[in-house]
Image (spheres, rainbow, N blue to C red):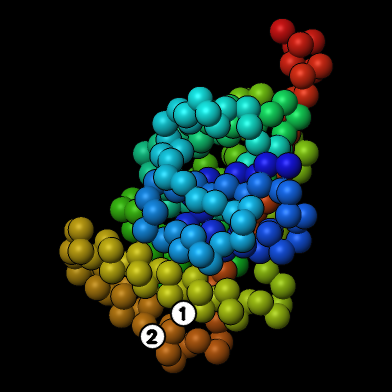
Amino acid sequence: MKIAELGTGTGVWLFEAAKYLPPPTQLDGFDISDEQFPLKEQCPSNLRFGIMDSFVDPPTSLVVQYDVVHLRMWTSNFRNRDSGVIIHHVMELLKPGGFIQWEEADLTHQVVVGEKAKQFEAGVDPLITVEFIVSSWVPNLSKRVKQIGFLLIEFEWQQFQNNLMNLCTNTYLLALREILQGIRQSCPSEAVIEHEIALQHLLSEERRSIVYNWSPTTLLGQRPPEDLISVSK
C-alpha cells in the first residue's frame, strides 16, 4: 500500500500513521517547502518527504501511484483559489479505487460560548475572511469532490469532545493571535489592533468562561474503480 499526504508540514499525521500500519506500507509526505520536514534520521524507513506544489500538475512519476491521499488543514491555502484544483490533482495521484481522506477546519460553523467571545467573533470574522482566510469552500467540499468524479463515502461535521474543548479553544485563540499579527504587518489598522487587545483579554481574563472552537469536518471519497470508469465512458 502507498499513502501520500499533501501539505504534510512536519509530517505529524504520517508519523502517527506509521505506528499502526505494517512496515511494507510506503508513506510519502509532500509540501511546497522542506522547511518543516524532519531530519531523515528521525523517520522510519518507510516514511519519506519530498517537495511538491500541489497547485500544479503532479509529476508523471507520481500519477496513479497511491492507494490513499490524505489532506488536513488546508483552510488558509485556498485564498482566491479553487479547491477543485487540488481535488483534480488528488484524482491523478490515486489508483482506480483509491481513496481521498480530508480533515478540515470549518470556520463557517464555529462553536462560541460566552458574551465576550461572541462579540469578538462578530468583529474579527469579517476581517479575517477579507484579509486572510476564505473558508466558505469547506461546506461545499462534498459537492466539489463529486463534481470532479469521486464517489462520496462520508462527509461529516463534528464538535470537539468536552474533554478537548479547553485545549482546542487555547489552540484556536493562539492561532488567531498569529493571524492578526500577520494581518497587522501586511495592512496595519486601528481595527486590527483593537481585535488584538480584545483577543488578549479573552486569553487572560475571560479564558475560563468561554469556548471558541471551529468545527472539525471529515471527508472520505473514492476514485471510481476501473470497471466503473469503463462503464461511465
Task: Check disc 1 and report its element: helix, strand or loop.
Answer: helix
- Residue type at numbered disc 2: His
**Looking at the rendering, which quadrant does residue 87 occupy?**
top right
Task: Name the residue carrying label 2.
Answer: 201
Task: Check disc 2 and report its element: helix, strand or loop.
Answer: helix
**Total marks drawn?**
2
Residue at image coords 41%, 69%: 176
Residue 127 position in % (x across, y down)? 34, 58
Q: Tell me the quarter of the image containing the N terminus.
A: top right
Q: Is residue 56 above or below residue 186?
A: above
The residue closer to the viewer here, 93 or 62, is 62
Q: Is residue 151 above or below residue 79?
A: above
Question: In the image, is 112 to the left or to the right of 205?
Answer: right
Task: Give the CA separation, mark 1 to mark 2.
Answer: 9 Å
Q: Is residue 142 above or below residue 158?
A: above
Residue at image coords 20%, 64%: 185
Which of the two labelled residues, at mark 1 and mark 2, occupies the earlier sequence position? 1
Residue 218 position in % (x across, y down)? 67, 51
Residue 100 position in % (x across, y down)? 67, 40
Could one spot residue 80 in this view of the protein? Answer: yes
**Looking at the rendering, which quadrant does residue 120 occupy?**
bottom left
Residue at image coords 69%, 29%: 95
Residue at the bottom extreme, as displayed: 205
Task: Name the residue carrying label 1.
Answer: 116
Q: Are marks 1 and 2 in contact (CB under 8 Å)?
A: yes
